[in-house]
Image (cartoon, coloured by chain):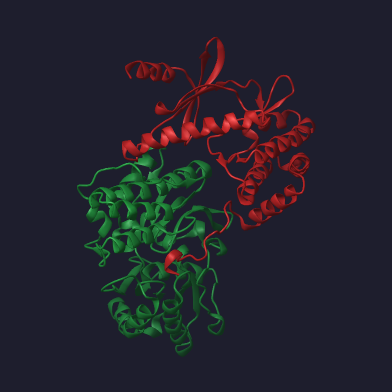
Amino acid sequence: MSSMRAAIGWVQGLKLIKRGAESEIRLGPFMGIPAVYKLRVPKPYMHPKLASILVAQRTRKEAKVIAHALKHGVPAPSLLAVLPSVGLIVMEYVEGVTLRDYTFKDPEGAVGYSRLAGVILGRLHLAGVAHGDPTTSNYIVTPGGGLKLIDYGLSEFTEDVEDRAVDLHLYRRAVESTHASIAARMYEAFLEGYKEVMGEEALKVAGRAEEIRLRGRYVEERRRSVWGALG
Amino acid sequence: MGIESTAHTFGVSIVSDKPPYILSDARRVYSPREGGILPREVAAFFSRVAGEVVREALDTAGVRIGDVDAIAVALGPGMGPQLRIGATVARALSSYYSKPLVPVNHAVAHVEIARFLTGLRDPIVLYVAGGNTAVVAYSEGRYRVFGETLDMPLGNLLDTFAREVGIAPPYVVGGMHAVDRCAEGGDFIEGLPYTVKGQDSSFSGLLTAALKLVKSGARLADVCYTLREIAYSSVVEVLERGLAHTGKREVLLTGGVAASRVLNEKIEAMARLHGATFKPIPARYAGDNGVMIAITGLAAYKWGYTIEVSKAFIRQRWRIDQVDVPWYYEFP
């Protein structure tokens, strides 16, 4: 256990590039190649036992989702190491710029990438996974001209129309909030790519995404009544 | 004047737009001898006490009904039989004394009273009560629901568990819920499910598993402790995600369960982690009361929101995101 603690200490010494609500992301070498170290931190407001159970569960699940996605042809980062007990996933560092930043530089090219982003999300959905946060900040345009989808921290194994529609909605909201002038074209291209993979089902999901947008929120009212079991 | 009657409390309050703002806060709370809340029994109780509560609110405030500018009433969301009592009283006062009638959404009012009491003006809000569990934040004219419970509300989870294992009613004694009392001396045990999906939490699986654990002979204090720990942690986590997502800098907790010390401590710790400001509200205003309806009604009335008596129907499932809040940035 002490060597594990030493390893985590070493990870915590790496360069921090992002601190999210869920985890800390650091950059460092892994067997000679640049890698991303994603460390889930126990929540300080939870009982330590509960916090560590969740860290382990979620780490295991995220790794499972990534492996599953890769198997189904989704360009996700390769897994290098997974240590659920300490909440660590080491994965391939995806070189490139986010689709978000790329769009500012090359709006026309971004429309093409947006179509590809739709293809990728379609593949993930077909594989039975909803991403949970597919914004343009989580698509990386690689130097070779490819596109990868990263961050599966909020992903779920689900084939529910609503969960899939939330993904579409989140993408649309991301392009609308940051790239208003070409948002419509980007989302249109995105849907085109998504339909290519999902076929007929895509229309249903896109329709539901439209409903979510009109509701002004992200999750459907699934309860029968506000009073739950009392009603 | 504000009238509240959505669940177990019949409350009437008089407020003014100048300090000290709250002039009176009269209320009667229905407490069942056994079992849960039976809407018809509560409604019968409300209709017995309504007259004296209105009278008390006026007398304490030292005003006569003629001095009142408008009658605000919670038309929903809530339980039908109880809502009808409050609505009937409000419609009668409004038409008999020719006072404008102001419709108020009970959920909006819970948020507004918290903003009013803490002075936090643009928060993300955890609203937890017997009938509601949601994380809301203002955006573009309305309170938007960021996340909520997919099945039962948090307060309902605690009440149902307490009733099933025989430690309630009474559900709340001295401001402390039966589950909180039972959790003292308990420790965390493994085996209960924790469910947060994206922006929502779910409690029905937790309830079933907890009851099963008790039946199989687990220490009741441990089950109470763990149930509470998981339930509170999951709503605070949804709140945390909402805070990160919306970029708000302030955090509020409101609704009946907001009286819980443990829940307040967890939110405090979460807010500190993200450098956000959290201010608890006095327990007296956590649960349902007439003041929150009056305060919200006052703001709405100033913005010209009134409703004709003949159209003032109750709305049992009136969602918080169906209500325009144009006074948001100019709240007292």
Q: Is residue B330 visible?
A: yes
Q: Is residue B281 visible?
A: no
Count up the numbered dots: 0
Instruction: State left or right for residue A84 relative to residue A48.
Output: right
Instruction: State left or right for residue A18 relative to residue A101.
Output: left
Q: Quadrant of residue B159?
A: bottom left
Whole-percent x, y for residue B33 in the image: 25, 74
- The residue at 55%/85% (across/down) is B310
**Chain appearing in green on the rendered image:** B
- The residue at 74%/23% (across/down) is A145
- The residue at 44%/28% (across/down) is A84
In the picture, the quarter occupied by the C terminus of chain B is: bottom left
Relative to residue A46, is residue B157 depicted above or below?
below
Whole-percent x, y for residue B55 in the image: 31, 83
Q: Quadrant of residue A182?
A: top right
Q: Nearest the camera: B100 or A22? A: A22
In the picture, the quarter occupied by the N terminus of chain B is: bottom left
Whole-percent x, y for residue B34 in the image: 27, 72
Relative to residue A209, is residue B19 depicted above or below?
below
Residue furthest to the front:
B216
Q: Quadrant of residue B166?
A: bottom left
Whole-percent x, y for residue B313 in the image: 53, 79
Residue furthest to the bottom:
B96
In the rendered picture, chain A carries what hue? red
Residue furthest to the top:
A32
